[in-house]
Amino acid sequence: MGFSLFPAIFDRPEKIAFADQEEDEYIELFLRHHWVTNVSWVFIVILGFVLPMVVVNLQVVKDLLVFSRMPTEIFLSLLLLWYMFIVLYAVSQFLHWYFNIYIITNKHLVDVNFVNLMSRDKIEVQLDDIQSVKSTLKGILGSLFNFGDVVIETAAEKQNINFYAVPKPDFVTERIQDLQEAEERSNNAG
């Protein structure tokens, strides 16, 4: 397997742990949204950095004399504010992608939703509570890059879990089903 700067799938990672992990629990899969899901906001950020340079150099804007009558300090302040907004948007989108994670262990499924720097939601479901698991590939990009959603339905009183835009959804579904079968065998044997 080649080098990847920010991989979206880790198969049996050894150096990753989470806060509520039990002593005899180990991580089978550690997942994030597929990297392709970042293309739209990266494009917006690039456009946001280039747009002021294009707008200032347009002849129509020069003819309106909007910027020629504006004091230089105000123009630079507005430009700095624009770029600060773009950087803030880029950082928030990256953090949202990086910290929204899905963890599949030998005992649980964990869905960690990053809301903002001050809060997160976590849903944890035991393998015994899973009723069904299915995967879906949506659209041309999903089929081309092999990413999609994994929908995990649980017992009626428990909350369902959805793993959105994960790489190799069929592989993830099969792994969850294999873990369920292993859990059933160990419960029947014990």
Image (cartoon, rainbow, N blue to C red):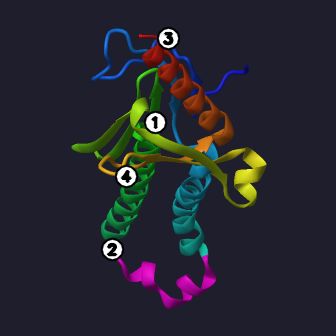
Q: Are marks 4 and 1 in contact (CB under 8 Å)?
A: no
Q: Which residue is mark 4?
A: 88
Residue 66 magenta: yes
Quarter of the image containing the C terminus?
Answer: top left
- Provide the major secondary structure of the magenta segment: helix
**Which residue does the image show at 59% across and 51% down from the upper left?**
37
Task: Tell me: residue 160, above or below residue 30.
Answer: below
Q: Please give the label number shown on residue 102.
A: 1
Q: Which residues are magenta?
A: 58-71
Q: Which residue is mark 3?
A: 14
**Whole-Å distance between the Cαs marked 1 and 2?**
51 Å
Q: Which residue is mark 2?
A: 71
**Whole-Å distance between the Cαs marked 3 and 4?**
33 Å
Q: Is residue 12 visible?
A: yes
| Precedes in sequence: disc 3 or disc 2 | 3
Task: Tell me: residue 82, above or below residue 32.
Answer: below
**Whole-Å distance between the Cαs marked 4 and 1?**
25 Å
Q: Position of residue 129 (x, y in %)?
A: 39, 37
**Which residue does the image show at 40% across and 42% down from the upper left?**
95
Q: Nearer the viewer, mark 4 or mark 1?
A: 1
